[in-house]
Amino acid sequence: MYKMIVCDLDETLLNDDGTLSAENQAAIKAAAAKGVYFVPNSGRSYTSFQTELATLGLKNQANQYSISYNGGLIVENAGNRPIAVNAMDYDLAATVFAVGAANPNAATHVYTQDQTYIYNQQPVDSAYLKNRGVQFEPLTSPDFTRFKSMNIMKIIMALPSMPERKQMRADVEAQVDPAKLAVTYSSDRYVEFNPAGVNKGTASVQLGKLLGIKPAEIIAAGDNSNDLPMLTAVGLPVSVANGIDAVKAAAKYVTTANNNQSALAEVINKFVL
């Protein structure tokens, strides 16, 4: 029996316009009624999906949980109480940020524990975030010292093409020991940098251990490369129909439905209800 579902949001649970379908809502509520945990596992901040949690009846609820920043933070939904904080070393984050800030084509995001900041905003990226309820503060200066006393969860760069994202990774790894970083790609727009060993999979297992849930009792659903670590860490890895080839290859089940067709409801109806 599966006891927990960890699920990516963008391009997996949510429609392309950022909305949550009625079918997915009903299936998640039915799973919760059976005592199965539903845990958003997103690269985004927990602050950006509070509306979805409210719709699901999970907002501000004790003994319900969310994972943010590709595993950088686990919170209990009641009061958004931190359960685990897996922050970046300041000097590491500062170096990664400096490489991004030097590229005029990149919108470089800094995610602290509770806030998102963007240096060199790009219209397409900003519109994508706003469509998903992500609030952010523009950075007008590349001076990184303002973050010295903050928990830095991750640094990411939005770039229009995969060759540019791969080049950004190479540029960062020319300045930083690659062994210190966990690097992923997401949403066909981002290259993301977390500390080594921090990812959606380690956080899923970490939360499961706190709840007495074994990896074999967890379902994980995703679509992109930052979801791969959680798919390889759990008992039932699932790719939605619109997942990239590597995610489909890692999955034990690939949905018939894509993210715009309530793919998660398909999973819950088949394996939980």
Image (spheres, rainbow, N blue to C red):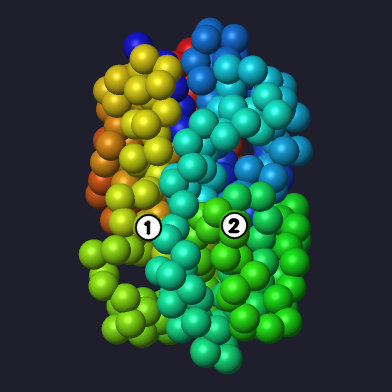
Residue drawn at x 42%, y 61% as measured from the top left:
89
> Visible in this render: residue 184?
no
Q: Name the residue under label 1.
A: 195
> Visible in this render: residue 210?
yes
Amino acid beneath label 2: Met
Amino acid beneath label 1: Pro
Whichever of callouts 1 and 2 sits on the residue coming sooner in the sequence is: 2
Depth check, front residue: 125 or 183? 183
Q: Which of marks 1 and 2 is in front?
A: 2
Question: Element under label 2?
Answer: loop
Q: Where is residue 76 in the image (x, y as percent from the top left)?
A: 59, 27
Q: Position of residue 265 (x, y in %)?
A: 54, 29
| Quarter occupied by residue 251 | top left
Depth check, front residue: 200 or 130? 200
Depth check, front residue: 106 or 164? 106
Indicate which disc residue 150 carries. 2
Question: Element under label 1?
Answer: strand
Q: Position of residue 142 (x, y in %)?
A: 62, 83
Say above or below: 176 vs 113. below
